């Protein structure tokens, strides 16, 4: 990177002073409400599966995750999820429905480049880093747990 | 000696070339904006009966050029150059449109300043005696630009208030030696200015210093003042960049407050949820060739300084930590 000059520094300071800030408080409140709502729906689905007789520690949670992933993907396909995300921000990105959205959105978008180099190759363009660092850190935590336990 | 050159960066034409016809195509969102009555063709969707957004963009540009040539009355085989550029990698919209149009083609790239770069080069060719009729065009498309520069459309992310919406559209103009208004009288070619901006979601404040530099150079070279113009219009600084540009000009003792506007603000209304405003090659192009050209023909404006602005980066180099270099070219349009 080129060295930043004093003139550039002064200008960036001016920009910082005048440029509008995102509405942080509103974003936080919306993220809390929508994120909480998605979790509430998840809880209702979980309770429903348990009431059907699924095992409450393994089967019902897995079925709940699968249902939420389906809902996230379905709403992305209908073109609704990005509109929710626009208002909810992190509230709809962080839950597992947001993960589904991040995979389905590029898969839909890159269909025009074909099923191999488009859909398949670009499917994880957003979710890829989450997978890489998610799996890597869970492996690391697992290793620490293994060492500490013995 | 370069007899038509003034000062460091400006050209003054001896026989100012005329813009004899223009044409504009815009997308559905621009078609609901405040300038909708100035556009020739408003699309109902983003695909324009094509299979992809890229193909739709190329088709918009081709349509705009064909309409402009038809309106000009110049026979197609008398168009001597087609000068065009766009935002997509390797300027494919322009060259693929050129493949179908069949005119001798000069591809240019100035990001969102392309329209002014094209008008400048085109006017130099015409006044230089190298051509009698040329056509200039440019295009951009919200969906094709988003996928190249940012995220997939259906991704549920939030955009900051400084973000701008890429205008879906294409504009074209025929420049000619014909004796007709409006004319291109001066062109000031900008330098690349980098004030250290790194945020690709805030192009307005990155480009504002380039616009100011070019305006200052234009006034200095041409010995003109803002009073000489009815309107000074920047390309796509939008709300954030426009405010900053105005501040920077005041610091240099240039007061343009009562006659300064920006294409990125004109093209959408605030209710359209486009954050800071419009951007993209088509932003300055459709506003200039739609709104400004028509108002100049009606005589509401007689002297306009168009200062189209562009951010000269791609997503790769920004991810590598580079700051964003920007440019602005000024074109004076006048009824003589």
Image: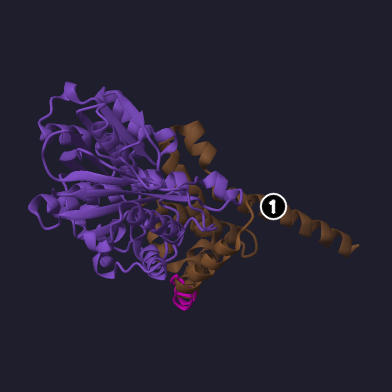
Chain colours: A brown, B purple
Q: Taking the image as drawn, is residue B235 in sight?
A: yes
**Position of residue B74 in the picture relative to residue A90 (left or right):** left
Q: Which x, y percent locates residue B13?
A: 25, 40
User: Residue visible at 34% across and 29% down?
Assistant: B106
**Position of residue B67 in the picture relative to residue B279 (left or right):** left
Is A33 included in the stretch rendered in magenta? no
Question: Where B178 sits versus A7, above or below?
Answer: above
Magenta span of residues: A19-29
In this rendered view, identify the residue nearer to me: B189 or B162: B189
Question: Where A40 sits versus A49, above or below?
Answer: below
Q: Which x, y percent locates residue B76?
A: 16, 24
User: Residue furthest toward the front?
Assistant: B1
In this rendered view, identify the residue nearer to me: B325 or B302: B302
**Position of residue B14 in the picture relative to residue B70 (left or right):** right
User: Residue visible at 17% across and 36% down?
Assistant: B68
Q: Secondary structure at mark 1?
A: helix
Q: Which x, y percent locates residue B312?
A: 46, 46
Name the residue tied to disc 1: A135
User: Residue furthest toward the right?
Assistant: A150
User: Residue visible at 57% across and 65% down?
Assistant: A9
Q: Taking the image as drawn, is residue B140 in sight?
A: no
Q: Which chain does the residue under circle 1 lie in? A: A
Q: How dense is the environment of label 1, judged by Cα within 10 Å: few (below 14), some, or many (20 and up)?
A: few
Q: Which x, y percent locates residue A111?
A: 42, 37
In this rendered view, identify the residue nearer to me: A28 or B266: B266
Quarter of the image with the N terminus of chain B in it = top left
Tell how many labels.
1
User: Residue visible at 15% across and 54% down?
Assistant: B302
């Amino acid at each position: 990177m080129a060295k930043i000059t004093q003139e550039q520094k002064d200008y960036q300071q001016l920009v910082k002073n005048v440029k509008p800030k995102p509405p942080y408080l509103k974003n936080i409140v919306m993220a809390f409400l929508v994120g909480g709502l998605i979790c509430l729906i998840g809880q209702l689905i979980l309770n429903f599966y348990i009431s059907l007789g699924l095992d409450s520690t393994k089967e019902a949670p897995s079925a709940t995750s699968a249902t939420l992933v389906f809902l996230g993907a379905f709403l992305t396909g209908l073109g609704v999820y990005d509109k929710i995300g626009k208002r909810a921000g992190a509230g709809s990105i962080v839950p597992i429905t947001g993960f589904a959205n991040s995979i389905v959105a590029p898969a839909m978008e890159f269909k025009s480049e074909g099923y191999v180099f488009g859909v398949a190759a670009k499917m994880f363009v957003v979710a890829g880093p989450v997978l890489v660092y998610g799996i890597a850190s869970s492996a690391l935590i697992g290793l620490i747990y293994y060492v500490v336990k013995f | 000696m370069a007899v038509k050159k003034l000062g460091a960066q400006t050209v003054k034409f001896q026989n100012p070339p005329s813009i004899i016809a223009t044409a504009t195509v815009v997308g559905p969102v621009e078609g609901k904006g405040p300038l909708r009555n100035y556009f020739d063709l408003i699309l109902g969707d983003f695909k324009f009966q094509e299979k992809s957004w890229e193909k739709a963009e190329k088709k918009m540009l081709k349509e705009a050029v064909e309409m402009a040539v038809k309106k000009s009355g110049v026979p197609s085989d008398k168009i001597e150059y087609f000068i065009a550029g766009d935002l997509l990698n390797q300027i494919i919209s322009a060259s693929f449109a050129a493949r179908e149009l069949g005119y001798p083609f000069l591809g240019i790239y100035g990001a969102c300043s392309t329209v002014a770069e094209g008008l400048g080069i085109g006017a130099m060719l015409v006044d230089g005696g190298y051509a009698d009729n040329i056509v200039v065009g440019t295009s951009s498309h919200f969906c094709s630009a988003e996928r190249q520069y940012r995220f997939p459309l259906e991704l549920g992310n939030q955009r900051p208030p400084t973000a701008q919406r890429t205008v879906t559209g294409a504009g074209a103009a025929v420049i000619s030696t014909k004796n007709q208004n409006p004319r291109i009288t001066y062109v000031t070619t900008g330098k690349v200015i980098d004030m250290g901006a790194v945020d690709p979601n805030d192009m307005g404040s990155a480009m504002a210093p380039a616009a100011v530099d070019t305006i200052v150079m234009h006034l200095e070279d041409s010995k003109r003042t803002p009073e000489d113009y009815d309107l000074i219009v920047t390309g796509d600084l939008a709300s954030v960049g426009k405010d900053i540009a105005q501040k920077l000009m005041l610091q240099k003792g240039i007061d343009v407050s009562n006659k300064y506007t920006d294409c990125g603000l004109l093209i959408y209304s605030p209710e359209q949820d486009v954050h800071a405003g419009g951007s993209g090659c088509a932003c300055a192009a459709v506003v200039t060739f739609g709104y400004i050209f028509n108002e100049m023909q009606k005589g509401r404006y007689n002297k306009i300084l168009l200062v189209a602005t562009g951010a000269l980066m791609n997503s790769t180099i920004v991810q590598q930590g580079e700051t964003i270099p920007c440019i602005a070219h000024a074109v004076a349009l006048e009824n003589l």
